[in-house]
Image (spheres, rainbow, N blue to C red):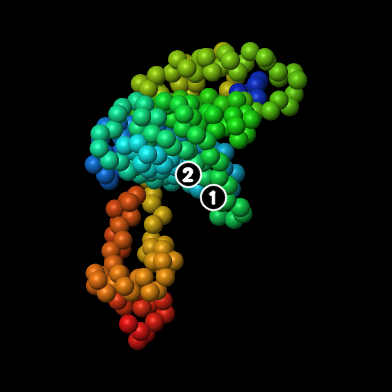
Amino acid sequence: MKHLDTFQRFLFDNHQIRGEIVRLDKTYVDIKQRQDYPAPIEALLGEALAASVLMSGTLKFEGVLSIQARGDGPVNLLVAECTHDKKVRAIAQWEGDVPADNLTKQLGAAQLAITIDPKQGKRYQGIVPLEEEKLAVCLTHYFEQSEQLSTYILLFCDGSSASGIFLQQLPARDKELNDDDAWNRITQFASTLTQEEIYKLAGEEVLNRLFHEEDITLYPEEPVAFECNCSKERTGNALTSLGQDEIYEILAEENIIDINCQFCNEQYSYQKADIDALFGNKTLH
């Protein structure tokens, strides 16, 4: 039975190749409907969202993986984030008309940053130039450059759902499992996957259709859902980082400071008493 809003890992038993499948339905709709995006950005946002879930499969700790691109084209910001427990959020910012199906024309001169932010430990960021027309190809280059591992990614989005498949060749550990043609053969089969198939078929059916001659271990599905980690505490920390003098100057002009989360549209309002509490002031200003 097909389940949507899920992430699923799989492993080729006779080859050092791992894989993942993601299918997003309600999760994608929940995110895209929070902004009035034009169709090309809806598609780009969906692909980035699916990619963030697939790439989060590399996380072996509690934390967040984010994909972020800033450019000088019509789309000036693209962000998609996924936590270790598959909570996702995403946003895009743009000006003017956005062309379809061409990443370099959408973002212009841009770089793609992949950030891994663990709850404990050191933050890591890898950066690759956006020089390809498809996000999947750019992300493939990222893995080949940063991890020196052959990687294959397919991303789909039709404006109502987003999905993708991820394959990666792992370092050989057993010569008996070495099959020089395995990677080429498996990626060729994967390239025949259609958006309709990955959306309509269960994970096992997708793999049987693509790799029916291979022995594959398919792991249990993991649910994926939209969740924003914004909070009153986080927005308060952002305000205090600006400094007391600047915040009170803004407050004097506006009487109230409103902060909207761009990911979920939640609004946080700060009156003078709130600002006083942030800075530990009782009678100042």
Instruction: Provide the secondary structure element on which disc 1 rests.
Output: strand
Residue 120 appears in the picture as rendered? yes
Of the residues shown, which amino acid type is indicated by label 1? Asp
Q: Nearer the viewer, residue 1 or 168?
A: 168
The N terminus lies in quadrant: top left
What numbered label is drawn on residue 274? none
The C terminus lies in quadrant: bottom left
| Cβ atoms at labels 1 and 2 below 8 Å apart | yes
What numbered label is drawn on residue 117? 1
Identify the residue at horizontal 48%, vertical 26% (top origin).
137
Question: In the displayed image of the protein, which residue is found farthest to the right?
Answer: 175
Side (left or right) of 196 relative to 58 = left
Q: Position of residue 232 (x, y in %)?
A: 37, 64
Residue labelled with disc 2: 66
Q: Position of residue 214 (x, y in %)?
A: 58, 16
Q: Nearer the viewer, residue 93 or 209?
A: 93
